[in-house]
Every structure is written in structure tokens, then in C-alpha cells.
Image: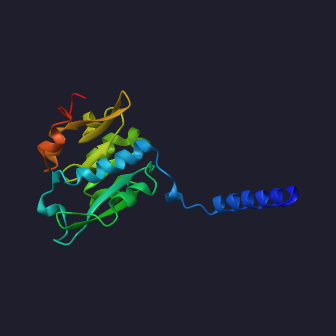
């Protein structure tokens, strides 16, 4: 191959990549390794939490994992739960722009983009059997149930047991054992 042919071939390849990036799907963003691990945590939480029967519309309703606000998972969360079931229920991922839309889910990841609205979010979710998961400062104190913490490059869990009980959720000892248990007002 001549030098000119190689340059033309390289130019065409770069052009094709630029063109493909123009049509890039917003959900196709690749999650960082941290959020890939957190997506797996969200999936695993569904196996260690028991929801009351009234949390589901019927016996065939899916278990819904929601993301409120900016989505740090990209398609990875969808890929993680695709084809999976928990207690005979299919898993489904939904993304929400407002807490008012999120009342049909069972696990709700509250993105950092919603940190300023935590008080309003938990006020609107009061009495709902939704496992709330976040990573913002003050998440448990505001009424959240599980907070991801990064300590020495490791993800740790902090659980607000009071909030879980208020949501009528039963958390397995397998979930509680490795976590820091705190009361809602003492994060």
C-alpha cells in the first residue's frame, strides 16, 4: 500500500468515527468501573430485600429499578439486569426526570444531580415501599435507605434502618452484615 493510500484510508476511518459519534445514543455511554460495580450492587440489592405484596400491582408485575436524575450507568445497568428475575419477577430499568414519575419503582437510585432536592424527594416518597439508594452527603439523614461511600478506593454501604422500616422493607442480614447501620438522623 502506498503512503497516499494509507493516508486516505486513515482519513476515511477517522471520518467514519466522527460521523458515528454524531449518531451516538445517549444511553450507550459507557459507565466507569465504579458505576459498573454500583450497577451490580443495585441488582444484588433486589435479591436481599423483601417488599410487601402491595408494592406490586399484581403477581406478574416486574421489579423496577429506577434512576432519578443524571444517569451515571449508561447502558450498563440495563445490561446487568437483562433477562434476570428475582422471586419470579422480571427486572426492568426506568429513568426518571422527576420524583413524581418514580413512584412505580421498587429500587430508586437518586443521582448526585438531585442532592439539592433530597428533602423534597423523600417527602414525596414517604409511605412508599421503595428502596432508595444514593451517594450524596446527608442521604441517610434526609431519609434515604442505602448510601454508597467510597473509602480507600472501596465501595462501602451505609444503611438507614429506620427509613427501611418506614418503607415497610425487610432487609436480609446478608445485606446488613457488611454495612454500617445508622439511624436516619445520625449520618
Q: Is residue 110 visible?
A: no
Query: At x 84% / y 61%, what residue is drawn?
Result: 5
**Quadrant, the N terminus:** bottom right
Corner quadrant of residue 64: bottom left
Q: Is residue 165 left or right of residue 75?
A: left
Corner quadrant of residue 92: bottom left
Q: Nearer the viewer, residue 100 or 167?
A: 167
Query: At x 14% / y 63%, what residue is drawn?
Result: 54
Q: Is residue 72 above or below residue 78?
A: above
Q: Is residue 51 above or below residue 57?
A: above
Pinpoint residue 82: horizontal percent, then vertical percent.
Answer: 34, 64
Colour mode of the rendering: rainbow
Q: Total marks drawn?
A: 0
Q: Nearer the viewer, residue 90 or 14?
A: 14
**Quadrant, the C terminus:** top left
Corner quadrant of residue 146: top left
Query: At x 32% / y 44%, what residue is drawn?
Result: 120
Query: At x 86% / y 55%, what residue is drawn?
Result: 3
Most distant residue in the front direction:
1
Pinpoint residue 109: horizontal percent, then vertical percent.
Answer: 33, 49
Amino acid at each position: 500500500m502506498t503512503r497516499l493510500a494509507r493516508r486516505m484510508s486513515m482519513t476515511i476511518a477517522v471520518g467514519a468515527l466522527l460521523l458515528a459519534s454524531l449518531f451516538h445514543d445517549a444511553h450507550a455511554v459507557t459507565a466507569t468501573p465504579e458505576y459498573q460495580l454500583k450497577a451490580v450492587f443495585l441488582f444484588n440489592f433486589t435479591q436481599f430485600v423483601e417488599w410487601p405484596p402491595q408494592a406490586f400491582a399484581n403477581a406478574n408485575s416486574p421489579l423496577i429499578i429506577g434512576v432519578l436524575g443524571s444517569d451515571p450507568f449508561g447502558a450498563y445497568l440495563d445490561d446487568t439486569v437483562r433477562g434476570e428475575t428475582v422471586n419470579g419477577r422480571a427486572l426492568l430499568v426506568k429513568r426518571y426526570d422527576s420524583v413524581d414519575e418514580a413512584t412505580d419503582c421498587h429500587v430508586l437510585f437518586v443521582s448526585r444531580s438531585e442532592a439539592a432536592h433530597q428533602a423534597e424527594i423523600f417527602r414525596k416518597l414517604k409511605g412508599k415501599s421503595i428502596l432508595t439508594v444514593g451517594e450524596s452527603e446527608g442521604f441517610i439523614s434526609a431519609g434515604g435507605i442505602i448510601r454508597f461511600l467510597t473509602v480507600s478506593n472501596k465501595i462501602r454501604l451505609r444503611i438507614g434502618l429506620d427509613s427501611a422500616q418506614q418503607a415497610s422493607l425487610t432487609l436480609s442480614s446478608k445485606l446488613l452484615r457488611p454495612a454500617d447501620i445508622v439511624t436516619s438522623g445520625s449520618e
